[in-house]
Amino acid sequence: QSIGCDDYLGSDKVIDKCGICGGDNTACKVVSGVFKHTLTNLGYHKIVEIPEGATKINITEMSKSNNYLALRSRSGRSIINGNWAIDRPGRYEGGGTMFTYKRPNEISSTAGESFLADGPTNEVLDVYMIHQQPNPGIHYEYIIPGDNVISPQLLTHRRPGEPLNGQLGMPESTNHEDEDLHRETDTLTGQSAGTFPVIQPGRFPSHQPENQVSAVQPPRQNREHNWKQIGKTECTTTCGKGSQYPVFHCVNRITHEEVSESYCDSSTKPIPEEEACNLFPCPAFWDIGEWSECSKTCGLGMQHRQILCRQMYANRTLTVQQYRCHHLEKPETTSTCQLKICSEWQIRTEWTSCSVPCGVGQRTRDVKCVSNLGDIVDDEECNMKLRPNDIENCDMGPCAKSWFLTEWSDRCSAECGDGVRTRSVVCMTNQVSSLPLEGCGNNRPSETTPCNNGPCAGKVEWFAGGWTQCSTECGSGTQQREVICVRKTEGNFDVLNPYECLYLEKPPSQQSCYLKPCGSKWFHTEWSTCSKSCEGGFRVREVRCLSDDMTASTQCDPQLKPEEKEPCNTQDCIPEIDENCKDKYYNCNVVVQARLCVYTYYKTACCASCTRVANRQSGFLGRR
């Protein structure tokens, strides 16, 4: 049968959260809250006070931070993280109980620090936070007993059959000797772990079988056996102040031979008292903290850890001066780290040819971010500050011999019949050319082009029509008029063959005209060749604003400026078939699946397979 907390066989009583055997959790009070104050100054800030007698203590950071929890007794003794020294996670004794200090892994966990203790405390304790960054919130909770509650410290010492929820005093029949014995036993059992267990004779009455005959003890002076100290227990520690207890055995008073303890009076057996041992301090050692997070998510970074010189004494670990650890090699506080290999930029193509035959144009190349496995990934995976340029200007030298043209005039020189439209043509260098026109070559663009607005009516003799409007709205132009040989009939004119009017002086059919200065006009070169032969390229031309004297000007209307760049060759590309590009192995599909085509050897050995994949990828990227 099981034994209940009241020490009776078959009892189902258990200790409730208040520490009461058979209690119903109503004899205590739960105190909890969250410390959320905004702090400004660095250093120690008091969070909460834990009263004497508190149990089930839980102090927890609500999330991970660079702050630390600290614990100090009301007497001023530091228990955890005192004097700006950060202790390692572990168990620390203080306030009559054992605190478990937890600090989750700094890299893999997001949980905060915590103090946990079962209690009860025997003095008031203060909880602090070492503030270094914004407070994430500190949750605290503990239990304090209510009125007329038996102290949990005394529950383990209650005799079987004693009242559970009553006064702490002894029954009236208890004599003073029993009270002293009770007090002594409580004191001994209240010592720290490792004390020698002592049970006073008569503390718990034993049951004597009916068939057992009790021996009559002779007077003390006539006894042949007595208790003798034959040694001590092993020291609980090898250094730093431990404890040990004397060991007593029953021996013959004359021969001093050890005999069974039944020969000696158990009531006279000395009580072993604790003795300090191995008082010399333990050797100092380096206490190594956890590594911090790597300073970089990829590539070579740095991580740090805290190294403290520590020394054990009286079951406590103390931080000491570092010179005490000089006999040991100090571990490194910093180290390089690399979580993964960073992706890198790769230049996949050479520069294209310049977009213009002369002057300043542009050229491009293909730059991709490639992972360490050879895959093309998003540009954000690479360091944007190190990205090579994929477009740059190119200077093909001055366009020293380029013809600059205006647009054709809108008006035909003849209102009817054949006429011409005109435009201005100028040979330009970097500045307005002072060279003769042949400096741009013999293929000078024409300044006139034929136009026809339909047939005209005729008249007798040479008939000259009215002058047309000037071929240009400004600057130098030409005017045209129709001159025909006609024969006047009644009410009509018959057109004759020109040779019939040869004896007459023929009027001029063209003359120059000048309406007004043009001011500034736009001039442009011929279009350059297309930058790509297929799948969409572009071509460019140079556009300049020139005044009447052919000098550079800024007075042209920007809205009328001709385009300097336009798309060209938008048709799909037809890949060229290289007869020398073949697969040398039958299993080149494995090379493609393993993405080994980025390496020169496999690109050559499996040329056809790698080329097909590259064409599909380039087509996909182009459409995207």
Image (tube, helix red, strand yellow):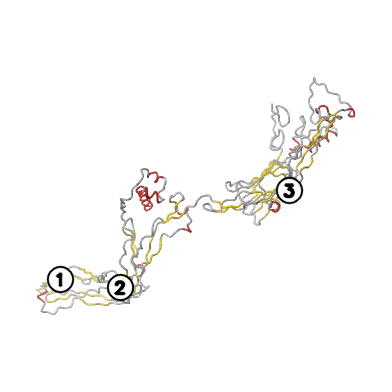
Residue at figure coordinates x 46%, y 50% from the top left = 372
Q: Is residue 548 visible?
A: no
Secondary structure of the residue carrying tag 2 is strand
Q: Residues within 10 Å of mark 3 (few under 14, many from 20)?
A: some
Secondary structure of the residue carrying tag 3 is strand
Whole-number angstrom distance, CA of label 1 to CA of label 3: 124 Å
Looking at the rendered structure, the number of numbered marks drawn on it comes to 3
In the image, residue 117 lies at what x, y percent?
69, 42
* Res. 73 mark: 3
Q: Which residue is mark 1?
A: 457
Q: Which residue is mark 2?
A: 427
In the image, residue 299 lies at what x, y percent?
52, 53
Identify which amino acid the numbered label 2 is placed on. Cys
Is residue 185 depicted above or below 86 in this figure? Answer: above
Is residue 274 depicted above or below 466 in this figure? Answer: above
Q: Can you name the residue that lies furthest to the front here?
A: 255
In the image, residue 311 lies at what x, y percent?
71, 48
Tell me if label 2 and label 3 are in contact, CB under 8 Å: no
Whole-number angstrom distance, CA of label 1 to CA of label 2: 41 Å
Res 544 quadrant in image: bottom left
Q: Can you name the residue that lies furthest to the top here?
A: 211
Identify which amino acid the numbered label 3 is placed on. Ser
Secondary structure of the residue carrying tag 1 is loop
In the image, residue 133 lies at what x, y percent?
62, 54
Is residue 12 depicted above or below 70 in this figure? Answer: above
Residue at figure coordinates x 79%, y 30% from the top left = 204
Q: Nearer the viewer's eye, disc 1 or disc 2?
A: 2
In the image, 83 versus 38, the foreground residue is: 83
Whole-number angstrom distance, CA of label 2 to CA of label 3: 97 Å
Identify which amino acid the numbered label 1 is placed on. Ala
